[in-house]
Amino acid sequence: MKTYSHADFKRMEAEALRNSSANFNGQNGQNKKQKSKKMKTQKFGIKGENNTDKDVKLALLPGTFNTIEEIQKVYPEIDGIITDGESFSKTIGGNLKKVIFESKSQKTIEHLKTYAKRVVGEIKDMDIVSMDKENFQQDIVFVETSPFDERPGFTERRLARFVSTHQNDNNRAICKNINIPFHPASLVILTICANSRMDITMDIGAAN
């Protein structure tokens, strides 16, 4: 049976330390490369129709909440969450009226919300088209949701400031540099007015 001297043990310890350091540096370098990979700016479009007699506030991104019931415990003024299909409904005169949304892109709205759960970026620009100009008098609001704050306050983006009297198409809000956070904790709310339609195209990419 081979015996080892004190010097042998010291040599083996030093070699193990070198190997451990090399592995750590290699993994750390890999992680840095992954973190430094910039989010590519891409377009995603949705369109919605509100057939009710109510201006409806809907969550485009639900933040850290999973259901509308969870959202309404903190923000009772929110009516629903935008999804593929029925996003809100109301009975009017015995008839069920709905707010319906659908994706204009290859992937679904649900896919977009799932994507927002694993990236940190922003909605850089929005192009909003609506024949009902009341929709441009509304605000898009957002907040970083937290389990520690009772009710974090919203930040507003007034759509009216993105509509110019000099533009050719008065049915469009061209929202350049609207910079709305797009990440797992981001709760983003938009309003679609009663008996109206909206068509929204977003440029989503890395935050500045």
Image (cartoon, rainbow, N blue to C red):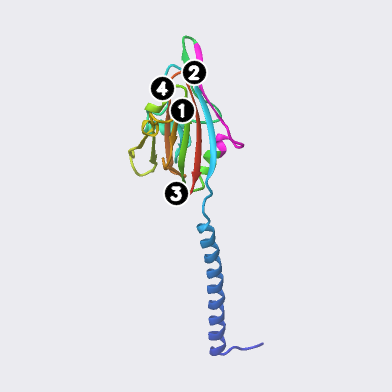
Q: Residues within 10 Å of mark 4 (few under 14, many from 20)?
A: some
Q: Residues within 10 Å of mark 1 (few under 14, many from 20)?
A: few
Image coords of residue 187 (percent x, y) = 42, 38
Q: SS of the residue at dot 1?
A: loop
The magenta segment:
95-111
Q: Which mark is residue 169?
A: 1
Residue at the spot of label 2: 51
Kind of residue indicated by mark 1 = Asp
Q: Which mark is residue 55?
A: 4
Front residue of 21 and 202: 202
Kind of residue indicated by mark 3 = Ala
Name the residue rendered at 46%, 40% in the picture. 125
Q: SS of the residue at dot 3?
A: loop
Q: CA distance from mark 3 to mark 4?
A: 31 Å
Name the residue rendered at 36%, 33% in the picture. 161
Q: Is residue 90 left or right of residue 84?
A: left
Kind of residue indicated by mark 2 = Asn
For discs 4 and 1, the disc positioned in front in the rendered view: 1
State yes or no: discs 4 and 1 in contact (Cβ < 8 Å). Answer: no
Front residue of 51 and 207: 207
Name the residue rendered at 50%, 17% in the picture. 97
State yes or no: discs 2 and 1 in contact (Cβ < 8 Å). Answer: no
Front residue of 99 and 137: 137
Q: CA distance from mark 4 to mark 2?
A: 10 Å
Q: Which mark is residue 207?
A: 3
Tell whether position 125 is magenta: no
- The mark that comes first in sequence, 3 or 4, is 4
Q: Residues within 10 Å of mark 3 (few under 14, many from 20)?
A: some
